[in-house]
Amino acid sequence: MNTLDASRVDIDSLATGLERLFTRWRRFDVPGELSFTAASTLRRLTSEGPVRLTELAAQETVTQPAMTQLVTRLEGQGLVERVKDAADARVVLVRATRAGEDLVESRRAARVLQLAALFAALPTQEQNALVAALPVIHHLADLPPSSWSRS
């Protein structure tokens, strides 16, 4: 096996390991009964602010009718609201309510606690290895969504 092949195996092993961790992370018990798409939509609205329903559907890669149904459900739960765009009163935007923001934060905090417990159970040497990887983890998390697709 040449150096390039060994590097590919290491990358594949890393990707497989991280995929297993992310899968476990998604199964963490967090407050609020939300589908993956609902949680992602609400998280996006709290971090990026109000957006048109059509743009939200495109960002979440669902159809506009599906996003309309999702927003209606989230609205019924008091987690989002539809508001007029200040720049153009004909445009309706979807934004997270305070309750929606609070739910996103409580879900994030619950995952952090569960991950902290998971990491605390590791030997010190493995904890140190994860700490050393933090700059790379932050870099990956900050990449734009377009970077995440494999060419």
Image (tube, grey):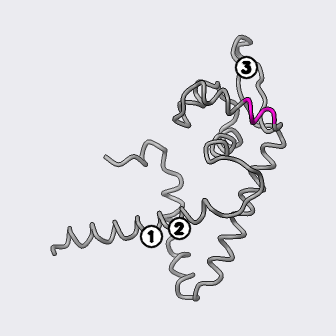
Do residues under tags 2 and 1 come within 8 Å of each other at their CB atoms? yes
Residue behind mark 1: 17
Label 3, secondary structure: give it. loop
97 or 72, which lies in front? 72
Q: In which quarter of the image is the N terminus?
A: bottom left
Whether residue 87 is situated above or below residue 122 in the rendered picture: above
The secondary structure that most of the magenta stretch takes on is helix
Which residue is label 3 attached to?
85
Q: Which amino acid does label 3 sit on?
A: Asp
The residue under label 2 is which amino acid type? Answer: Leu
Q: Is mark 1 on a helix, strand or loop?
A: helix
Q: Residue at x 62, y 48 (%)?
A: 36
Taking the spot 57% from the left edge, 88% from the top edge, the residue there is: 123
Q: Which of these two is toward me, 105 or 143?
A: 105
Kind of residue at badge 1: Gly
Q: Separation of disc 2 and disc 1 at Cα?
A: 6 Å
Q: Do labels 2 and 3 touch, CB within 8 Å?
A: no
Q: Earlier in the sequence, mark 2 or mark 3?
A: 2
Q: Where is residue 76 in the image (x, y as percent from the top left)?
A: 81, 33
Q: Picture coordinates of residue 115 (x, y %)?
A: 65, 70
Magenta region: 72-76
Instruction: Point out the frontmost of discs 1 and 3.
Output: 1
Q: In the shown orientation, is residue 75 left or right of residue 61?
A: right
Is residue 18 rendered to the left or right of residue 13? right
75 drawn magenta: yes
Vertical position of residue 79 compared to residue 21: above or below: above
Which comes before the other along the chain, label 1 or label 3? 1
Q: Please indicate whether residue 118 sits to the left or right of residue 141 in the image.
A: right
Mark 1 to mark 3 CA distance (whole Å) = 44 Å
Q: Where is residue 39 in the image (x, y as percent from the top left)?
A: 67, 46
